[in-house]
Image: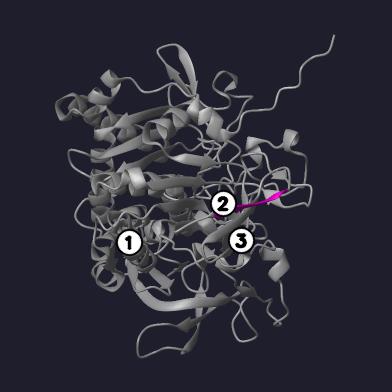
Amino acid sequence: MTTPLTTPLTTQQRIDAAPATSARELRQRRNPLLQLWPFMRMNVSMFMLARRHHG
Amino acid sequence: MATVVVLGAGVSGHTAALTLRRKLGRDHRVIVVSPNSKWNWIPSNIWVGVNRMPSRRVVFPLAPVYKRKGVDFRQAKAVALRPEGDVLDGRGAVDIVYTEKGREGEQQRVRYDYLINATGPQLNFAATPGLGPDDGHTVSVCTPAHAEHAAHELAHVIERLKKGERQTLVVGVGHGTCTCEGAAFEYAFNVEHELRRAGVRDLAEVVYLTNEVELGDFGVGGMVFDRGGERVTSEQWMLSLFRERGVKAITEAAVDSIEPGVIRYRQLDGELAELPFDFAMLLPPFRGVHLEAYDRQGESIRDALFAPSDFMRVDADYTQKPFAEWRAEDWPSTYQVPGNPNIFAVGIAFAPPHAITEPRFTPQGVAIAPSPPRTGMPSGAMGKAVALSIVDMIRAGDDVATHTASMADLPAACIASMGVGYLSGSAAAMTMTPIVPDVRRHPEGAGRELGATTGEVGLAAHWVKRLLHSAFLYKAKAYPLWYLIPE
């Protein structure tokens, strides 16, 4: 019995096979109201990260 | 009274100069030597390059800021270091040549007690035949002028697309050893966003051409995120984003040469492949800024201070060893130059001990080896740490650096723009701790803290990117309480 040789996928093939972003997630990413909370969270977390390590 | 000379006024040098001036009394001198009259917030050059921000919004003149803060600014380029001084004076000195209008070519020898080399990169377009906007066939976004030129060329492409002509736009890196893949990624996605905005996306093919081993590597070996208990790699994340936006990608590529309309590149198999293009923005590899170095008698000591790449040797372990033996501790922490405790090199100017991503080679020996990124946040942190060490050294009168900023400890936050617009914009926000992975310390997150290594996409990240643009310009202009904004 022989083991079939497999060719690794190219990066483009991996892109084509990647999971598609759901419509719900796309809406969430683009909705200004829903993005207010991530905006505040990102600012605080990045500020804290920088202060903690660079202080 | 001590004199501190800072070579370079980019993120690292400017941060160091302002910190020194804030912490040192007026009886000490801070001298900044930079060939450029203006400071440039380089991350926003991306937006200049797609014609969404005028170049005047990413620069400001340095002289008024330094005058207000009491920093002696000399618009000149450094050409030689003399760590032992010369036969007339045993203090260290640096030879400079003025670039200031009206004083071009004037030479001066500046004495120092402490020296910070923050000269940044030499854009090495010559490494690849045909690369670059001056003598080549590609555009760049490395400087505001380059970005303006790129925007102009992009506008022509959009005009042709509007006439119904198909166009191929290639964005990426122009050599196997390039760094700053994140900036190339940003420009690719901003271009894609602008094509969509212009209503011509369907006729355009956007190709991301990179030396990364896989998408999401960014020259830092990729990242692993924890999403509600599920491990997601930066590659998986990027593959989905590229699919979502219809951007094609070629990885593990070393660009060999560029002729009008054709990029030639090699991948790991060594075969030469061709990629036709109508528009190409390819970043150049970096070298260090070339400086001569002499001992007191005028004999060259260049090789002792600089690596062949012109980057300066600091307190790193530069021993040649296999990839499997590389350690996080190899990376420098104080940025002191061995044997010269009063000289430091920070930002892009220091020689990294090795890459972060494992280098690969074609059968012909062509390196496909992303260089480690050391711009932005880590550059600022290094500049500040070195400035604080010098302040302590001056006060204590010794040569012990008291502050460290190893990339094996430092975190980094990167907001990669994917399109401009207060309501239509998007960006990928990434944080990682530390920058140089240490699998022994953090085995669970492929060398990084899982909780402090994150990735998120959305409009909010674009707002953060826009806010950082204003915040860092405010900080760089040294407006009131500037120092409260962290690096």
> Residue B326, image x and y in percent?
70, 37
Callouts 2 and 3 in the same chain: yes
> Residue B414, how many percent across, how many down?
39, 40
Question: Range of the magenta residues?
Answer: B271-275
Query: Mark 1 falls on what kind of element?
Result: helix
Task: Give the letter of the chain under mark 3.
Answer: B
According to the picture, the residue beneath numbered tag 2 turns out to be B400
Residue B273 within the magenta-colored segment of the rendering? yes
* Residue where numbered disc 3 is placed: B311
The answer to which image quadrant residue B62 occupies is bottom left
Residue at left offset 64%, top offset 38% = B329
Please, what is the three-letter code of the amino acid marked with disc 1?
Ala
In the rendered image, the quadrant that contains the N terminus of chain B is bottom left
Chain under numbered label 2:
B
- As helix, strand or loop, the secondary structure at mark 3 comes to loop
Q: Which residue type does callout 2 highlight? A: Val
Above or below residue B21? Residue B73 is below
As for residue B423 lying within the magenta part, the answer is no
**Which secondary structure class fits the magenta region best?**
strand
Image quarter for residue B257?
bottom right
Q: Residue at x 49, y 30 (%)?
A: A15
Give the residue number, with chain letter if any, for mark 1: B151
Q: Residue at x 67, y 64 (%)?
A: B305
